[in-house]
Amino acid sequence: MMTIDELANVIKKEFSVQKIILFGSHAYGQPHKDSDVDICVIMETNLPFPEQAAIIRLKLREKIKEKPPIDLIVRTPDSIKEELKKNNFFIRDIIEKGKQL
């Protein structure tokens, strides 16, 4: 099974990202055998976030043989700032408690 750091390295190599943040049970030290890997990719993109996330997922599938369960979200730096201003708890939790890869 590919490690989380190896997954992050594939994303960094293939895309121009500013940050990759691991969040959820793997970041907080509470994963169980069925836990998915929660990743927030912060990058500049003109695409809708779900579409950009789908492109990253496709690239990961091309590059790795096993298919780890990944929950991947994409945001731009500006969208992160806006969500923090709005006190979006989900984004704040990722930024404050997540682990940068």
Image (cartoon, rainbow, N blue to C red):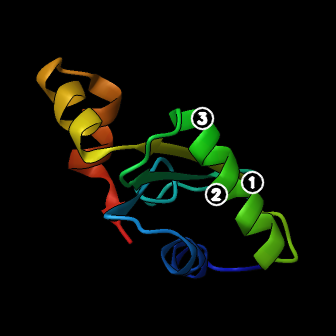
Q: Earlier in the sequence, mark 3 or mark 2?
A: 3
What's under tag 3, amino acid-wise?
A: Pro
Q: CA distance from mark 2 to mark 1?
A: 14 Å
Quarter location, residue 32 = bottom right
Q: CA distance from mark 3 to mark 2?
A: 10 Å
Q: Which residue is mark 3?
A: 50
**Crowding near pointer 2: few (<14 within 10 Å), some, many (20+)?**
many
What's under tag 1, amino acid-wise?
A: Pro
For the N terminus, which image quadrant? bottom right
Instruction: Out of 84 and 51, give the one closest to the viewer.
Output: 51
Q: Which residue is mark 1?
A: 69
Q: Which residue is mark 2?
A: 56
- Is residue 32 found left or right of 73 in the rendered image? right
Q: CA distance from mark 3 to mark 1?
A: 17 Å
Point out residue 5 in the picture as x, y percentages from the top left corner.
52, 79
What's under tag 2, amino acid-wise?
A: Ile
